[in-house]
Structure formats: C-alpha cells, structure tokens
Amino acid sequence: MPAATQFLLPLCLGLLLAPRAPGCLYCFSTPQQRLRVCQTFLGHTSPQHVTCLGTLRAAFQPYTRLVVGVAEMEKLKDTFSSLIFSLEEKGLAKVSYQLAIPEAVARIQPELAQLKPARNRSDAPGLNAGIWPDLDSSSSASTAPACVPPCGYQKDAQVYKCASCSLVECQLPLDCPVEDVWKNEGNRTTLKCRVQFQTPPEVQISWKFAKDLRTRDLSLFRNLQLDTGSSLILQPTRALHRGTYACQLALQDDVLARKYFYLNVTGSSQGSETELQDMFRAILQSPAGQGTGRAGGQLPQLSELLAEPDSLRKRNVVLLMVGLALSSMLGTLLLGGICCWAMGRP
C-alpha cells in the first residue's frame, strides 16, 4: 500500500466517523492532530488507527454537551490543547493508548471543575448534567452570569457550547420597551439610564428626544447635547417636554442597550386658577371697576380714559375698536331709516 494511502485512509475514516456533536476535544483540535496522536502510539503504518480514534472519541463523549461562560472559553481551549500534547508525550514514552487516554480524561476533570459553568438556558435545558452534578442552579456565585431580559447586549452572559463549537449570545434585542412616565406640569422629572445587567464603568451614555411622539424610530429623534451622565433631570417639567426620551449605552463601537421613556405631561390646575385670579384682579383694577370719584356719577370723557395708565393694553384696545364698530353700525342703520322715511313721503 502506498505511503500516501496509508496516511489518508485513517484520516478519511476519522472524518466519516466523527459525531454530529463534536464535543470539546473536536472543537479545540484538528483531525490531523488527533490522527498524529494515534500514529504516535501505534506508528504510521498500523491498521489500528481507526480503533484508536474511536477510543479517543468515546472517552471524551461525556463532554459533548459541556457549556461554559465566555470568560472561561480560553481556559477550556488551553485544557484540551495541552491534553493533545500530553497524549503525544505518552505515545513517545511507549505507553498504551488504552491506558493513556483514560488517564488523560481523569487528569482534566479537576481543571474542568474549576471552570464556571453556564446556567441552564431555556433553549437547551439540562446542559452540563453529569459534568457538575453538585452545581446548585439557584446559585449565582458558582456560575457565569445569566441573561437578564428584556433587552441588551450582555457580553458577560455569552456561553460557549461544545456541542456546536460556537459562542451563543442571549438573543435579546438592543432596544428596550418604552416606559411610560406620568408627571404634572411644574413637577421634577428624573429619567435614569440604567439596565439590570452589569455594565463596565467606562460605558458611554447619550440622550435623544422626539417631541410629542411615542416611538422607538431613531430617525425621528434629535440629539440632546447634555452632559448629564446616567440621569436626565427636568425641573420644572413643562408641556413642551412631552415626548419620548431615548438613552443609549455604548462601549466604543458596541451598543449595549437603548432605553426609551415616554413623558406624559398633564396640565397643572393650580396654574389655571392663578390665571383666572389675575384676570379677575385686572378687571377690578380697571377704571370701570374702580369708579370715577366724580360728583353725581358723571362719566369721564374718552380723552381722560386714554390718559389713564395702562389704558392702551391689548384688551382695552380691542374693546375700544368693538365699541367704535358698533357705534358706526348703529349710525348707519339710523341714517338709512331716516332716508327711507323721507323718500316714502308724498
């Protein structure tokens, strides 16, 4: 058999026999590396390479569904990378692979036990079962952070799955639901840009505003040039503040979350009462309400009224114009009646 065929045949059989769920060993090693391990134990021309690869795969089958937090991914990779190297050393030392592989599995168990496992997720219940049998699912001290709904890019809550050799995110939207805030006009309003999951201290916060709209469409917002940090304070709150406020939490180019607050501003009854009191006081203080102080109730002339302070206020001017218009209309009607009476005589 040619030398090339002797090398490719075990490699092809190893690829065909690879499980659908590769497991951690298959995530952090290549087919060539695993074949080289068996060649180290058996030599390059041995017909038992396929059997050796099957033993290697079966020994690490319990770690097929292993899931760890993203912070433990590099440690997991280092563990299995060093395992390949140690198996090669055992092969060079002429140790049987039937003994070396189980010993390697037993050696990495304490290292894996020190890693923080991921909490069981709703999309894959029962993960890590049998790997950390003493893990209390309600404990947060011994596990990686869990995903906190309803929104946000939570990098620390990402998990690495050996079943798919992939990094899995929380699958939550960046945009949080709109929160309704009700305030009376004149009150103090405080909007806090905080999320339920942990954020780094260097997170950047920016604010936007969409007047009189309840929306999450970013194209309808305008930027607020404010240096308010995580809280936006409106004091006093006015009707013109009604609308949606959006705050964005970002870390460099990564958006962590966007929160939305719709501020409902209701009119203050105290303000309406004050306005009515001012109008009533103005009427009482007007020349007509104060009386003239003349003997016999003699009314002042027009020139005297116009000479009074504040006589040409907008309200007085309007009343004067209405009076002139009514007088002109009455004079026109009177003149027309006289003309009709005169023309009707013989």
Image (spheres, rainbow, N blue to C red):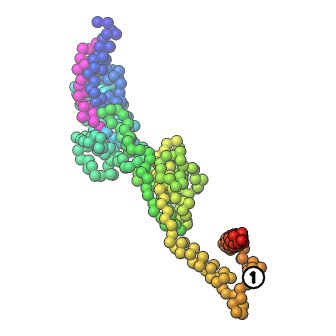
Q: Is residue 62 magenta?
A: yes
Q: What's the amino acid at mark 1?
A: Gln
Residue 316 shows up from this direction? yes
| Front residue of 317 and 121 | 317
Query: Closer to the camera, 151 or 65?
Result: 151
- Using the image, determine if residue 52 lies above or below residue 140: above
Q: Give me the residue at 72% from left, 76% from top.
A: 311
Q: Residue furthest top?
A: 1
Q: Residue at x 57, y 50 (%)?
A: 223
* Magenta-highlighted residues: 44-66
Foreground: 106 or 321? Answer: 321
Find out whether residue 38 is within the magenta segment.
no
The residue drawn where x is 34% and y is 32% is 165
Residue 308 x/y as whole percent: 74, 80
Position of the C terminus by quadrant? bottom right
Q: Position of residue 156 (x, y in %)?
A: 40, 45
Residue at 24 percent of width and 34 percent of height? 62
Q: Secondary structure at mark 1?
A: loop
Vertical side of 303 occupied by 206: above or below: above
Q: Identify which residue, 220 or 84, lies in the foreground.
A: 220
Mark 1 closeness class: few <14, some 14–19, many ≥20 residues within 10 Å = few
Q: Name the side, left or right, on which 309 lies relative to 151.
A: right
Q: Which residue is mark 1?
A: 301
Q: Position of residue 185 (x, y in %)?
A: 52, 66
Q: In this picture, is 55 found above or below 48?
A: below
